[in-house]
Each structure stands twice: as structure tokens, then as C-alpha cells.
């Protein structure tokens, strides 16, 4: 399912397509805003999004074998809830 299909599914269950688009965009914007502030986003029955920071480290270029410095960065992690896992299995 992509974003357009999600908007269509929301529109079929509650409102017009334009209202559904606004609602979906608002939810995504709220999640992005919280993650940008490094806050955890927990959606009951679905899962938890959180920001993890990786440390800078030394890596190796596989083509040349040369050592390179890999900078620290932030990653988004998602952990599915028990209910979501149970639904899939």
C-alpha cells in the first residue's frame, strides 16, 4: 500500500478524499516533527518509532581496501507491537 492507496482507504471509511488527504498528511507531519525533536512515537496496537544515533567509526573501502572514516548519523527504528506481530503470524 502506498500513500495514495492509504488516503483512498481512509476516504472510503470516513470522509471525502480531500479530508482524508489532509488527515493522512497531518498524521505523517506529526510523526516527522516528533522524530525530528528526537521524541519517541508510540502508536498503541501498531508500533513504536524512535531515533537511534550511530557512532562514527572506521570502515574499509571494499574496492581499494583503504580505510575510511564513516561519520556518525541518526537512523529511524520501528518496532512492531505485539498485536501487529500476532496479526501477521
Image: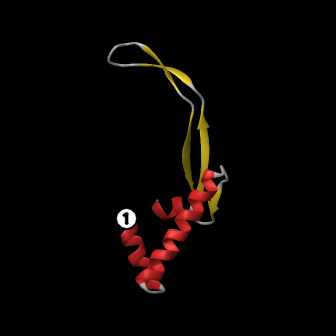
71 lies above or below 49: above
Q: Nearer the viewer, residue 11 or 80?
A: 11
49 lies above or below 83: above
Residue 66 at x, y percent in the picture = 41, 13
Disc 1 target residue: 2
Q: Nearer the viewer, residue 21 or 86?
A: 21
Q: Residue at x 60, y 29 (%)?
A: 55
Q: Nearer the viewer, residue 84 or 49?
A: 49
Q: Residue at x 57, y 31 (%)?
A: 72
**Dot 1: element:** loop
Colouring:
secondary structure
For this orientation, the residue located farthest to the bottom is 15
69 lies above or below 77: above
Say left or right for 21 vs 48.
left
Query: Can residue 83 be seen?
Result: no
Q: Nearer the viewer, residue 34 or 50?
A: 34
Residue 77 at x, y percent in the picture = 55, 47
Q: Quadrant of the N terminus?
A: bottom left
Amino acid at each position: 500500500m502506498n500513500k495514495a492507496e492509504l488516503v483512498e482507504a481512509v476516504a472510503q471509511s470516513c470522509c471525502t478524499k480531500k479530508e482524508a488527504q489532509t488527515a493522512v498528511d497531518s498524521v505523517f507531519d506529526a510523526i516527522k516533527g516528533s522524530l525530528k525533536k528526537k521524541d519517541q512515537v508510540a502508536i498503541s496496537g501498531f508500533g513504536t518509532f524512535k531515533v537511534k544515533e550511530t557512532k562514527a567509526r572506521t570502515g574499509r573501502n571494499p574496492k581499494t581496501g583503504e580505510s575510511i572514516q564513516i561519520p556518525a548519523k541518526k537512523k529511524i527504528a520501528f518496532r512492531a507491537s505485539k498485536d501487529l506481530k500476532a496479526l501477521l503470524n
